[in-house]
Image (cartoon, helix red, strand yellow):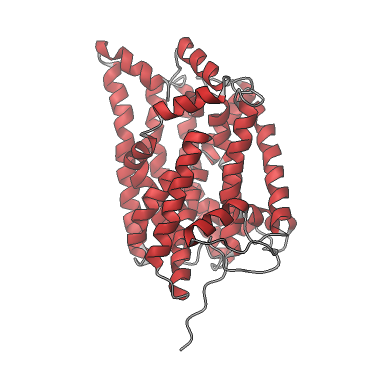
Amino acid sequence: MDSPAAPQRLPSLDLVRGVAVLGILLLNILAFAMPEAAYVNPRAYGGAQGADLVTWAANFILFDGRMRGLFSFLFGASTLLVIERAEASGRNPAEVHYRRMAWLLVFGLAHLFLVWHGDILAHYALIGMIAYAMRDLPVPRLLGMGTMLTLLGAVLFATIPLNIAQLHASPAGAAQLQAYAQSFGIPASADLAKDLALHRGSYAGLLADRLREDGGAPFGLFVFFGPETLGYMLFGMAALRSGMLRGEWAPARYRRWLLVCWAITLPAYAALVWAQWASGFDIRVVAAMMPLTALVRPPMIAGWICLILLLARPGGALTTRLAAAGRMAFTNYLATSLLCTTLFYGYGLGWYGHLSRWQLYPVVFGIWALILIWSSLWLAHFRFGPFEWLWRSLARGSFQPIRGSALSSNASASQ
């Protein structure tokens, strides 16, 4: 009997992934360009008035955490798709999966220490190793387990604002509060000066700092963010298995889900923006956003999937370019880190800390244009992005063919 045909690539998955790889830079640009606390607190650095305040609010309402969550959904969906392909082709799915995750971990650790401290690849590799055990669950159980894990994540996140509130009430808590200010509040002038000097300095200084400070980062992410990330991967598996991410739903169903999801979440996020602004971006209120946004983020991510697929125009120039960017998401993610660290760090152009919040977005749009242009050009001549090809070759233990246009066929490459 003939073996079942391997599933083909899903244009819908590439398209959504393309939006995600562009969208995540809307937030990551802050981590490349400014001290850590600026990511969540506009008063920490980068401006909290006028255009800077509007930029922060728009990001918080529409994108913050949603693009990262969308990536996690897509990672879960892609993991399931790779497993299905391995089974359909007669390969051992466990061996295929764990070899991929092992090499992704290597890439992630290299990215973390050699390029940028904000790596997510190592975290995905570790959580992906756990997600394999849930691959055969039906959609209701995937959704149920994903919901429980997301709630567990919210409980873990709630420990931070609770601890900050306790420290505020304690005369002896000033030193610990200052440590929290590095992430959620307004850092001391001396701490900001130290951070600026580090990132405007040499590569050797940054490397030494990462090796000293970030050695436990993958473990910390695994413990603190692991439940939420795993929950999102299970949601992505459910979205693929239900047909949502395959683009198989009727347009009316996508519109209904978009309306319901965003009717709930947009007002909630707007209220949270007002609460932070009204408090003067008090550290206790800013920190409380972690558990509160965790509760409303998943339905908004689902709404984003629906919106992207509703707006897609098969064969359209933008849709085609976004899908190409998504097909090369691994390469584009790493290339973005290499480009942004070169622009902002001292061993490159040294822009770190020199631009206000809104001034970062012309840089973002320029990088978007580069990604959309170069992804299509590359895939017109090659089957995979360069890092996708390297990952695939390492995981399979031999150099894989790369020449030949990826855009002229629907080759069943790894998602």
Comparing 222 with 16, the one in front is 222
Place of residue 381 in the rendered image (x, y in percent of width and height, measured from the top left): 72, 59
Residue at left offset 42%, top offset 54%: 101
Residue displayed at 54% across by 65% down: 246
Q: Is residue 113 visible?
A: yes
Instruction: Residue 220: give x, y in percent of width and height.
Output: 34, 36
* Residue drawn at 28 percent across, 15 percent down: 173
Which residue is depicted at the point 55% across and 35% down?
28
Res 41 visible:
no
Which residue of the protein is positioned furthest toward the front in this rendering? 398
Question: Residue 148: horizontal and vertical position, in percent?
Answer: 30, 51
Q: Nearer the viewer, residue 405 or 190?
A: 405
Left or right position of 391 against 283: right
Reply above or below: 32 against 71.
above
Question: Which of the 4 image quarters holds residue 235?
Answer: bottom left
The relative height of residue 164 versus residue 291 in the rendered view (above or below) is above
Is the N terminus in the top left, top right, bottom left or bottom right quadrant?
bottom left
348 left or right of 99 in image: right
Q: Is residue 158 above or below residue 414?
A: above
Quarter of the view holding residue 323: bottom right
